[in-house]
Image (spheres, helix red, strand yellow):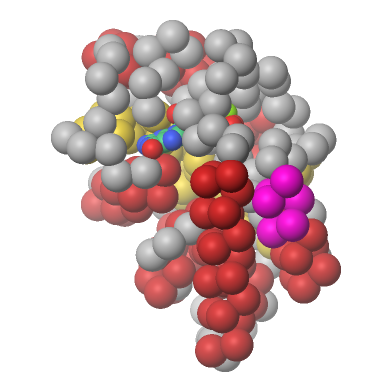
Amino acid sequence: MNAAIVIPALNEEATIAAVVAGAAGYGQPIVVDDGSTDATAAAAAAAGALVVRHERNGGYDSALASGFARAEDLGFDALVTMDADAQHDPTALAALLAPLLAGEADVVVGVRPRCARWAERVFTGYARRRYGIPDVLCGMKAYSMDMYRRFPGALDGSIGTGLALAAARAGARLAFVPVPVRIRPSGRTQFGSGLRPNLRLLRAMVGQMRRRRVSAPTFARDDG
Ligand SMILES: Nc1nc2c(ncn2[C@@H]2O[C@H](COP(=O)(O)OP(=O)(O)O)[C@@H](O)[C@H]2O)c(=O)[nH]1
Ligand SMILES: [Mg+2]
């Protein structure tokens, strides 16, 4: 299986080269540099990533959208996401990809030891109760390209999370794999942890609750 490892990055010049080098053993790193003002793009390219560059910052989800679209254009058959700040351990990619490679799952969701923000705990609790997904907001997830193609409606808003939830609603096969999360080397977060990022997460959750009401199961496997 030919996996694209999509890495959204905003001003991560300190860590991006090591992340790309670590990920390269598991697939093709595609770094989406989202209007960084530092050397993220150059460092990523030098480390062997394909770089998709946004001239202006469009946010994490728009970066995922660009990376997924590029991976589809290039003919990859699996999509993996991970962060650029070295909080995710690239060696966890082996376990994340294993259920896809074995043909046992369509979507694999990483499970962190804990959530970073209070609104994540609210959203995660909803997804756990409603769909049995333990950590729907984990930045490490893997999808078959088939999932990406089947749920174009899930690709506006919270993209990776939306795709995982759309797949779950439609009865696709999900697998869950524990992933370690390291302390952010710089100590800061790009999203922040104040009221605004928390409200953004709650809005995304409400959007997903609405979707649940309007979407009917549409998933059927090709092989019956
Ligand atoms: N492309 C893009 N990536 C972003 C943006 N904000 C954060 N990121 C990336 O998303 C990942 C997770 O962000 P981070 O702030 O570490 O989130 P946290 O780990 O939940 O605190 C990192 O790789 C960031 O570089 C953004 O506006 N655009
Ligand atoms: Mg982080």
Task: Name the main secondary structure of what is drawn in magenta.
Answer: helix
Q: Which residue is painted at 28% across and 25% down in the image?
A: 36
Residues rendered magenta in the picture: 118-123
In the displayed structure, 168 sits above or below 20; it is below
Camera-side residue: 47 or 64?
64
Q: Which residue is painted at 47% across and 49% down in the image?
A: 78
Judged left or right of residue 141, residue 20 is left
Spot occupied by residue 142 in the image (x, y as percentages of width and height)? 56, 48
Camera-side residue: 41 or 200?
200
In the displayed structure, 9 sits above or below 199; it is above
- The question of residue 203 being in magenta is answered with no
Spot occupied by residue 195 in the image (x, y as percentages of width and height)? 59, 44
Corner quadrant of residue 211: bottom right
Q: Which residue is painted at 38% across and 13% down in the image?
A: 13
Quadrant where the image shows the C terminus: bottom right
Q: Is residue 75 visible?
A: no
